[in-house]
Structures are given as structure tokens and as C-alpha cells.
Amino acid sequence: MLDENSLVLCGATLGSNNFEDLVTAARLGEFDAISLMATFYEDALSRGLTVRDMEMILNDNDMVIAEVDALLSWLPGSAPEEGASEYEKENYNKKEELFFEMATLFKARSINIAQAWGPKLPVEEVSEAFSKLCDKALNYNLLVSLEFLPWSGVSDLNSAYEIVQFADKPNGGLMIDTWHHHRSGGDPEDLLKISGDKIISIQLNGVSKDPWEDIVEETISARLLPDEGENDVIGFVKNLDQIKSKAPIGIEIFSKELYKLPKEEIGRITGNSLSKIVKKAREDR
């Protein structure tokens, strides 16, 4: 069972869609689990791998899937805007049935969702859509985590937490990514205002001092390792422990520099960075 001591390698960190490479990188980085994006699953199937093949790869590497990430089409009125890239459109068009398929086949713990596009909608409206998804997920014993993105209608921790509280679902909670939290003006102390049992998943990463003009481009190409950024990741983990969060701790590094390295090296580097940060945060515990 995954908990606050479990480390998760998020798929986007790899810079490719190869399922086998992701699992191998996670094993070499001494991770406990991976976060699976739909592109990895679809690519594996297109190359002739079966679900049984993928299960065997996971078992052979002593690996499990923590979550499937990220469902973007759950909220009515949040389709990509005119001029969106083909990549953005492709990701939005991946329907919830695909995510439930992946989650149930691989016995994932949770489904992560986000509003990537569209305006800020009334809390009641967003909560209704969130509640419906949570109700469906409950039938499969799945958790649902809502991730906030600084440029979206659900832009910060407060707005995401308000939605989760309004919905009041036993299997609904938050995904908190330290990059998004820092770029939305947040700091580690904000965690002390929320309930630890409403945090479902965590993604740690480092943030550079000066934001880019295009924050979306920055977030998908220039993240730093957790021990390299300006943000206080150690304080963040300490406060997670203080509010008794049981969420697994992941690492998600979109980085063009990191992507230049061999996949095995990415696994080792990110695993070392994540474990070092967590160990440092908990050394006096």
C-alpha cells in the first residue's frame, strides 16, 4: 500500500512515451511506483504490447502504478482555446473512459484531473463536475485528485481546496505540484491551512528564480530538480508531515535539459534528488 513514504516517478519526467523505459528508470531510481500517462499506455498497445505484457514488466521490476495522469476533459466548458497546439488538443481529447480503463486494469490508486483551459467557473459548477467524477470513481475504489494550474480557472491551492471542500467526497482531494504552487504565489505555510487527509498526491520539483513571460512554456520545458530551485521544497515536505498527509510523494520534471540524458540516468538522477530532499526534511522527525 502506497503512503507518505512511497516515492513516485511521474511519466512526464522521462521525455518520451515508452512504457518499458519508464518502468526501468523508476527501478534504477529506487522508486516505489510510477504515474502513468495515457500516451505511454497507447504507445505500448500500438507497439503490440498487451495489458498482460505490461503487468509482467511491472511485476518483474517490483513496480506499481500510483495514479493515471491527467484527465483534462472532465469539466464542461474547458476545451482548448482557438490556436491551441495539436499536442494540447490531443491530450484534451483523451476521454475519461480511457483513464478508468488504465486505472482499473493496473489497479492504480487514483486518477489525477486538471482544468488546463477555459475560464474561472463558479465553485458550484466545478464542484458538481468533480463530484460526478468522484462518484463514478468510488465504484472502482479509486481516488480522484484535483490539480491546480496557475494559468487556469482553478489557479491556486485555495481555489482547488474550496472545490474539494464544497464537493465533500470521501474519495476526492488534491494533487499539489510544488512548481504550480510556487508560481501561483503560494508557499509551504499554506499547507498548514488545509487538512492533510484531503491531499491525495504530491509532485515535487524546483522552480527558477525568475518566471518566464510564457508560464505554460516554462512549466513544460524548464522545471528544476527539487534540490535545485528557489522554492522551499524541504519546508513543503516538513509541513506535509505536520498536517499528517499520507499522500505518496512524486517527482515531475518537464525539462528539455534533462531529456537530453539517457532514460536510465534520468531515473537515477531524479530518484537521488527526491530521496535526498525527503530525507533532509525528515532527518529530525
Image: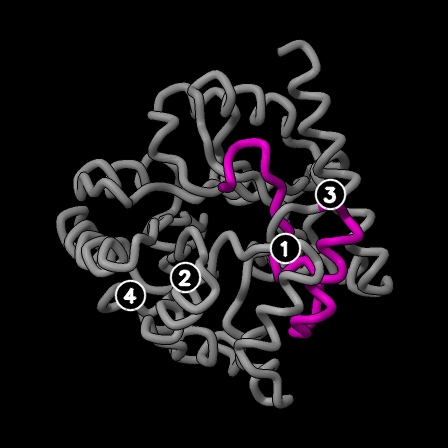
Residue 37 in sight here: yes
Q: Amino acid at mark 2?
A: Ala
Label disc, if present, on residue 225 of the rendered structure: 3
Residue 116's tag is 2
In the picture, residue 80 is in which quadrant?
bottom left
Q: In terms of sequence position, does the residue under pointer 3 or pointer 4 come before the other? A: 4
Give 172 or 103, whichever is nearer the viewer: 103
Quadrant of the rendered image containing residue 39: bottom right
* Distance CA(mark 3)–CA(mark 4): 30 Å
**208 up-or-down from 216: above or below:** above
Check disc 4 and report the residue beneath it: 74
Distance Cα–Cα, label 1 vs label 4 = 28 Å
Which residue type does callout 3 highlight? Leu
**Above or below 82: residue 235:** above
Tell me where the magenta segment starts and ends, as one range.
1-30
Instruction: Name the element at disc 2.
Output: loop
